Amino acid sequence: MPPKKKSGKKKSGKKKKGKKSGASKEPKLTVEEAIVTFQIEVKQRNFEDLMYDLQSLKEKNERLKDRNQRLKEEQLLHIKTLLKQVKEKDKEVEKAAEVGHEQVEAALLQKFDLMKAEEAEVQAQNDHIQKKEAEIEEVRRDIRRLQEYRDIAHLERSLKIAKDEIETYTESTISKQKDIANEKATNNLDKDSCGEILDHRWLKKEVAIHREGHADLSAKVEDLEKRNLEIMSEMFDCKVEDLKFTRQFYLSCIEDEDSSDEDDVEDDGEEVIASHGVLGEQNEKPDDLLDNYFLPGEDDFQDSPRLGPMELQLLSVIGTRKPVFSHPMDMDPDRRELAALPDSADSSRPGNYTSPRNWPITNTMLQSLAIQ
């Protein structure tokens, strides 16, 4: 740092003291001499300031010279290190293998391909960005449309609420006015007319009560009908299962019939069409009839050895010797009642064995099962 500048006031003060002391000893100066003396003092003060500035500049110059010297030394050191690095690089280049023309072309082609791939990727990214911008614009349009729809729906809903309020208010006011008018009209009527009006109101209330009861009963009846239909469907399914079981039972009976002796069969003129094309007669004892009776709870009836061959897919019908009867619908009512009675003429049947005419199985049921 440059030395502090000496203040000139102290010097001037000393000079003034000297002047005073000199003035006390010497005689007084004239005006011109005083002016010249003052100018000389000013010049001396300026000279001292210049000398002080010169000294500070010299010191600064010396410092800058020292810094430049240090920078030159550092520059030379860096130049030496750079030269060493350049020499090392040159040695490495000399040691490296020489690259041929083909390798240079391959490297250039690879670089060209990389540039093409980068350009294609940039183009794909730009296309993707454009697509996303289009999607964003579409979403914005949808948002604007939904906002408009929301605003319109809000207005419509508020309008509907206002209309409903107006309608309820008008209906309430109209009903009140009607009640007031009815009261005024009834006040002017006689007792009989008032009684008729009261009866009419009571009848309206009763009609409303009866209508509510009718609606409740209708709902209960519909519920009962649904339950009835479900029960009927379950019963029909049970009958179908029973028919399947009886089919297997009669197949086993037919198998036993075929293996028994057929010499005692007599032809009485009745022709019964069998699915296997055989005309026969069923002469069984009560014990033989119940011999092949099979209960579903005993064991698996499909694996029972008493059943016939399972590959037989059609029902077989065996004719029995019976008197010829006409159809019950073609009979007279008296004869129909007699025909409905159990057939007691055949002593070979058990007591609980009823006539086939009373069975709940029809030919259509058997044909449908045979087709299945």
Image (cartoon, rainbow, N blue to C red):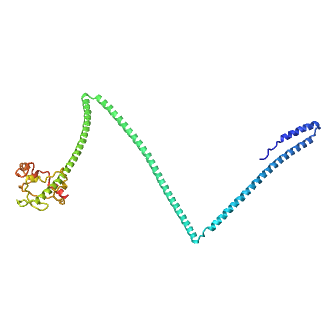
- Between 316 and 198, which is closer to the camera in this rendering? 316
Residue occupying the far right of the picture: 27
- Between 298 and 274, which is closer to the camera in this rendering? 298
Residue 220: x, y in percent? 24, 41
What is the total number of numbered labels drawn onto the structure image?
Answer: 0
**Going 67% across and 63% down the picture, which residue do you hit?**
86
- Between 106 and 218, which is closer to the camera in this rendering? 106
Q: Can residue 139 be seen in this view?
A: yes
Above or below residue 334? Residue 273 is below
Residue occupying the far bottom of the picture: 101
**Going 51% across and 59% down the picture, which residue do you hit?**
125
Residue 236: x, y in percent? 19, 50
The answer to whether 233 appears left or right of 164 in the picture is: left
The answer to whether 80 appears left or right of 166 in the picture is: right
The answer to whether 47 appears left or right of 97 in the picture is: right
Residue 40: x, y in percent? 89, 44
Q: In which quarter of the image is the C terminus?
A: bottom left
**Going 72% across and 57% down the picture, which residue do you hit?**
74
Residue 260: x, y in percent? 9, 59
Q: Can residue 317 be seen in this view?
A: no
Above or below residue 339? Residue 92 is below
**Going 82% across and 49% down the picture, which residue do you hit?**
55
